[in-house]
């Protein structure tokens, strides 16, 4: 893997040889671990040029608009697979055969219920609390209910915890929503698919059980697939960092949820709807497009472009098709906000300013529109993101623990005071 070497010349010192590591695909990586012996270390705020780990799970080529899970393009998984099959792939490295898939789906379904006492836990939250605040609390609390499988050094315990998290996240997410609405919490149904079951727990009540639309269930399943993993982003890195301390899996996932909550990360699709509210009406679009193009204006069009993808977000292509299917299924034609969103999409796909800068609608733009159309409030958007991303987080956590690892301990460039002595209070000015 380390076929080549780089040479670092530091003035006044002997040159330092650093191995160059080559992955399966992607750019080569300079191994700087030996640099510490020279009394130096690297400075890279935001980790823009730092590989924090070695991984076999997900690969992204932002320039070409490529996203692969275990080598499979995201477009193929969205078209030919389903979420639980994708979960199996991320967790185990290969797609399941028919028998393996049936066993995995059955196992997940047998773990969808949560401990009945968790219902009481919700009563400690205000009804108007942000759903992500509640989600952080209840997911972290799972470790108090399932401490029979918290030995992180036991591979079987890691498997059990992974399945429990994938299975229980839809149940917890729906409970968070029902609690905020003051409605009875719905038990999961094992006769439904993963996405159908989530929509059932979200929108049905004990007094009225409505059939789940196959189109909406498919849309929900695709949203789950398209958000399942995205390499070493802020929340995944947070889960790995928490896991490196030996923390239990439920605590690690709760940490990931907290990181995802930030508007620069998981809150992006919620920010899309907030932006549409700010623009207000189609008649205001020209003014806001001009503001977006003005580099001195702080206004930004949310849901366009991506930090990683310098080409089109491959997930957005799938999500656009899904968006069209959902709006057609629901017969939504006269919603002012959706009309506004569609007009912005049209401009972004045809205006040279956006095309030259690759500011195409991204996955957050379309997922926000779909979730709103289905009837999910904007405050729940990031909860659904967390639900879908849990399998990616736990896959990375498992991968880290299955190999030798060290507790994460970034260094810093210290620019504070040098050593100084305390002056007595009476003598301070």
Image (tube, rainbow, N blue to C red):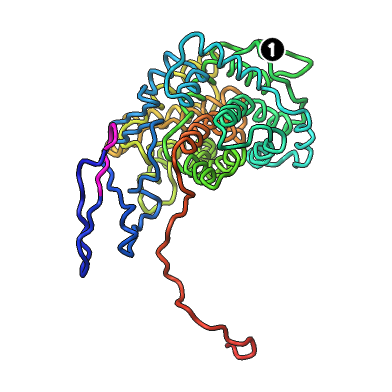
Q: Quadrant of residue 428?
A: bottom right
With 109 as the anchor, is 402 left or right in this view?
Answer: left
Percent position of residue 423, x then y: 58, 86
Tell which residue pokes out farthest to the top in this image.
98
Task: Check disc 1: other Cα within 10 Å, few if <14, some if 14-19, many if 20+.
Answer: few
Residue placed at 49% from the left, 8% from the top?
A: 98
Q: 204 and 245: which one is in front?
A: 245
Residue placed at 27% from the left, 42% from the top?
A: 21
For the record, the magenta segment spans 19-26
Tell which residue pokes out farthest to the bottom in this image.
427
Q: 257 and 1: which one is in front?
A: 1
Q: Quadrant of residue 246?
A: top right
On the question of residue 352 being in view, the answer is no
Q: Taking 10 as reference, is 308 above or below it?
A: above
Residue picked out by circle 1: 210
Residue placed at 39% from the left, 35% from the top?
A: 55
Q: 163 and 45: which one is in front?
A: 163
Percent position of residue 175, x then y: 70, 29
């Amino acid at each position: 893997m380390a076929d080549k070497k780089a040479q670092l010349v530091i003035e006044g010192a002997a040159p330092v040889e650093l191995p160059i590591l080559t992955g399966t695909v992607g750019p080569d990586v300079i191994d700087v671990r030996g640099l510490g012996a020279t009394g130096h270390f690297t400075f890279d705020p935001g980790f823009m040029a730092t590989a924090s780990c070695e991984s076999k799970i997900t690969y992204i080529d932002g320039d070409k608009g490529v996203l692969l899970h275990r080598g499979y393009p995201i477009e193929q998984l969205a078209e030919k697979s389903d979420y639980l099959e994708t979960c199996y792939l991320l967790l185990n490295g290969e797609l399941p055969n028919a028998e393996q898939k049936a066993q995995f789906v059955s196992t997940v379904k047998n773990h969808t219920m949560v401990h009945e006492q968790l219902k009481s836990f919700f009563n400690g939250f205000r009804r108007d609390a942000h759903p992500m605040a509640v989600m952080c609390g209840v997911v972290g609390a799972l470790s108090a209910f399932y401490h029979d499988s918290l030995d992180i050094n036991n591979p079987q315990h890691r498997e059990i915890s992974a399945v429990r998290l994938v299975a229980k996240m839809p149940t917890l997410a729906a409970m968070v929503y029902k609690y905020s609405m003051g409605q009875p919490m719905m038990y999961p149904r094992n006769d439904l698919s993963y996405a159908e079951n989530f929509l059932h727990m979200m929108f049905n009540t004990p007094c009225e059980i409505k059939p789940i639309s196959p189109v909406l269930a498919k849309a929900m399943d695709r949203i789950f697939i398209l958000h399942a993993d995205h390499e070493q982003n802020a929340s995944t890195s947070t889960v790995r960092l928490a896991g490196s301390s030996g923390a239990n899996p439920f605590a690690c996932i709760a940490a990931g949820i907290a990181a995802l909550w930030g508007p620069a990360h998981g809150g992006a699709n919620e920010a899309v709807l907030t932006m549409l509210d700010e623009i207000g009406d189609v008649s205001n679009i020209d003014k806001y497009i001009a503001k977006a193009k003005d580099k001195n204006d702080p206004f930004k069009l949310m849901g366009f472009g991506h930090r990683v993808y310098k080409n089109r977000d491959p997930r957005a292509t799938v999500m656009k098709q899904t968006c069209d299917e959902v709006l057609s299924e629901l017969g939504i034609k006269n919603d002012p906000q959706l009309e506004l969103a569609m007009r912005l999409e049209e401009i972004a796909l045809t205006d040279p300013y956006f095309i030259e800068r690759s500011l195409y609608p991204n996955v957050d733009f379309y997922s926000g529109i779909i979730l709103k159309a289905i009837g999910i409030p904007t405050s729940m958007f990031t909860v659904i993101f967390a639900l879908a991303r849990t399998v990616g987080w736990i896959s990375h956590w498992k991968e880290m623990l299955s190999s030798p690892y060290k507790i994460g301990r970034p260094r810093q460039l210290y620019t504070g005071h040098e050593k100084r002595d305390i002056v007595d209070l009476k003598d301070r000015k």
